Amino acid sequence: MVLIAANKVYGDGMTLILFNKPYDVLSQFTDRGSPTKRKTLSDYIDEPNVYPAGRLDKDSEGLLLLTDDGREQSRISDPKYKMLKTYFAQVEGEPSEAALSLLRQGVKLKDGVTRPADVKRIEPPDIWARNPPIRVRKTVADSWIEMSISEGKNRQVRRMCAAVGFPVLRLIRWRIGDWSLDDIKQGQWKYC
């Protein structure tokens, strides 16, 4: 990667920003039509003329890429390019190997069968605390999985996990292609 700090550009003169989106923040710069003021990207990012390459739901956290280049925006977000996206998901219950196997084969959802996912159980990642914390039920255990997918159906990871019986309590996108959150704190961003 070529980074020219003075000009804040990546590669061929394009700006690329990596942002660690907090929970309850919209993946857009304005919130039109809402009776209450919700947090948006403009509460965190003051770089002009950049736009999100894809979306991350309000109740999901983690890596969001922003660019001023339409072709790069499409390459990152369009499923036809099959850019791998990796998530950490805290799920209700402890997924069995049979449930993980179903995710690895692809899951039938209302809008079609998903592509196979790369998924495994993991130890709780060393990450920031969520504010507000997740809802915890004393009678139901929770666990973490890491899931990588190459498409972007609406709320796909949440729907896939629910389809195999393990609803998502917390969802963090950790990686998109070669970019990751390795050194970006929650609510912070950097040029790439």
Image (cartoon, helix red, strand yellow):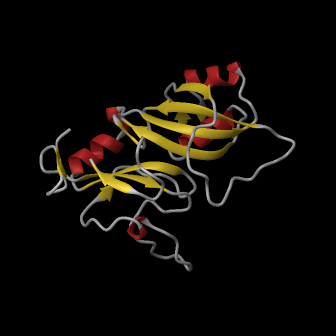
Query: Is residue 110 at least partly visible in the picture?
Result: no
Residue visible at 61% across and 52% down in the picture? 129
Picture layout, residue 135 above or below residue 113: below
Residue visible at 18% across and 53% down in the picture? 5
| 4 horizontally vs 72: left or right | left
| 72 horizontally vs 103: left or right | left
Residue 139, given in percent of the width and then of the height, sits at: 87, 42
Residue 189 sits in which quadrant?
bottom left
In this view, the residue in front, 48 or 123, is: 123
* Quarter the N terminus occupies: top left
Residue 12, given in percent of the width and then of the height, sits at: 12, 45
Total count of labels: 0
Picture layout, residue 99 above or below residue 39: above
Residue 88, given in percent of the width and then of the height, sits at: 56, 38
In this view, the residue in front, 111 or 148, is: 148
Residue 180, given in percent of the width and then of the height, sits at: 39, 40
Picture layout, residue 91 above or below residue 70: above
| 35 horizontally vs 85: left or right | right
Residue visible at 23% across and 51% down in the picture? 70
Residue that protrudes farthest toward the bottom in the picture: 35
In this view, the residue in front, 144 or 26, is: 144
Query: Is residue 36 at least partly visible in the picture?
Result: yes
